[in-house]
Image (cartoon, grey):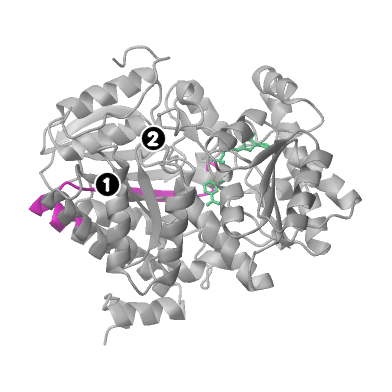
Amino acid sequence: MLEATTEVIRAPRGTSLNTKGWQQEAALRMLMNNLDPDVAERPDDLVVYGGTGKAARNWECFHAIVRALKSLENDETLLIQSGKPVGILRTHEAAPRVLLANSNLVGKWSNWEHFHELERKGLMMYGQMTAGSWIYIGSQGIVQGTYETFAEAGRRHFGSLDGKFVVSAGMGGMGGAQPLAATMNGARFLGIDVDAARIEKRLASGYCDHIARTLDEALAILHAARRDGKAISVGLVANAADVLPELIRRNIVPDVLTDQTSAHDPLNGYVPNCMTLKEALGLRQHNPEEYTRQSMRTMGEHVKAMLELKHMGAVTFDYGNNIRTQAKLVGVEDAYEIPGFVPEYIRPLFCEGKGPFRWVALSGDPRDIYRTDELVLELFPEDASLHRWIELAQKRIHFQGLPARICWLGYGQRAKFGVAMNELVRKGEISAPIVIGRDHLDAGSVASPYRETEGMLDGSDAVADWPLLNALVNTAAGASWVSIHNGGGVGIGYSHHAGMVVVADGSDLAAQRLERVLTTDPGTGVLRHVDAGYEQAIQFAKNKGVRVPMRED
Ligand code: NAD
């Protein structure tokens, strides 16, 4: 069934195995789920999200991975090198079934030029974060993080985001969560994207309310919503670098301003202005050097306009796409006056090992996820924001591909919840195993000086030992698959990060693995922030009994 490259890929559903065990089955279903047309941005090219983030290097590799997973024994481990299956080695039952390393380059060569050269030779692929590590769950994977970030920006600057005007650009795989996250917070949202198809996809999934072809049309919808006291989102088909200067000319200042275009990749992600999208795509094909030049120039204009709107009063932050660095490279010296979203809003959560924890029902049955929703509320009755989140998610989030849920949970909470889910699988209250994973954007799994580790207290922003330790300890603890990547959301050379996935199949062994991995994983987050000197993390580690040798007598 998987021979043709144009064939639609969807994960198998139900309770029968296509492989020799649920660990392998989970990897197979999640690889395929990443390429489900309801989940992936460009499945025909194996592109899942984030510019060119791929699930496998090419179709030949994809089919070879599928074959390898189907034949993989319960004491073997499959090795994936940048989307290509390169070997199967005997390990043991509690070891990961798959280990993946994607897009990693030796420091001196760790740049887009060298990466593209290797990619052209068929030696590498871009793994982004959860694309190459098979735990992407569509826009919902990011929507709670975006929701919490917008909520925190609203709380911090206005008391709440209710009734406020939020402007951003990029309505792709991740950016497409913004309209929903904004309206869930009661805001009015304008999202600019050059590609109408991306906005239409968000309309179809219920993430965005309207599409507009001109700024006047968009503003008319937004004005009417303000008059009626409604939270509403509008996707405007245009280039952000054209629209923001026009807002300045008209003296329209957003309350909150950010950006999620694929700025991390000037060639295959960001789209330059002063040409139509079609012309841009042609230029990308025929003259990549000129395209990159135009793209960088446009990012300079884009960030200059963001800075101007910031000076005019918009609460402005960088949303993890490295656009400030690109602008600085073309001479926008004050680009870093725009703060990054992690130090602004997320780091206190990281200090307690809190991050985007997610799980997926391998059965394909939404009732399994609703049962886990009940469970998480039963386990953490005191967490008001979690309750609000689950209620909103059930009402507003359409499943894409296999039913999934995301919840920001921390150290202690994750292990408790994972083991309890395993118990429900064992008892048959959940019909098939649950896959548990997370984004690489997490407390202890990433070194990214322009994003997750920007402005660390002790200046350790670029220390990449931490994600490597995270991957090593999660492997030792028995995760189902573990990955180490370079690049992710900020581009080649700008970050190192690690992923982990662990499967709750209802067995005793799974209970042990879950308990261990869901403790070691957020544990490295707490340790990373203790080591950097964050008082909140130090107190948290003390209270929870997380051992830190340099702080023991
Ligand atoms: P994507 O490639 O799926 O979507 C990017 C969108 O930007 C596309 O729809 C494209 O048409 C649009 N675009 C490009 N240039 C534009 C321009 N000049 N004006 C208007 N629209 C333009 O990418 P994605 O998965 O949505 O990710 C977006 C960015 O956010 C990436 O750089 C990604 O690495 C980063 N990211 C951020 C987070 C986070 O937590 N904040 C997480 C993951 C990824």
SS for dot 2: loop
Residues rendered magenta in the picture: 491-514
Indicate whether residue 528 is drawn in magenta: no
In this rendering, is residue 372 above or below 92? below
- How many C-alpha atoms fall within 10 Å of the one at disc 1: few (<14), some, or many (≥20)? many
Residue at position x 53%, y 44% from top? 174
Whether disc 1's CB lies below 8 Å from ligand 1 is answered no
Indicate whether residue 500 is drawn in magenta: yes
Mark 2–mark 1 Cα distance, whole angstroms, equals 14 Å
Relative horizontal placement of residue 543, taking residue 536 as reference (left or right)? left
Can the viewer see residue 447? no
Q: Position of residue 355 (x, y in %)?
A: 41, 60
Q: How many labels were placed on the picture? A: 2
Tell me the residue that label 1 is attached to: 368
Q: Which one is in front, 357 or 325?
A: 357
SS for dot 1: helix
In this rendering, is residue 367 above or below 526? above
Q: Position of residue 398 (x, y in %)?
A: 45, 42
Tell me which numbered mark, 2 or 1, is placed earlier along the sequence. Answer: 1
- How many C-alpha atoms fall within 10 Å of the one at disc 2: few (<14), some, or many (≥20)? many
Q: Position of residue 390 (x, y in %)?
A: 41, 58
Residue at position x 47%, y 40% from top? 128
Can the viewer see residue 234? yes
Amino acid at the residue labelled 1? Asp
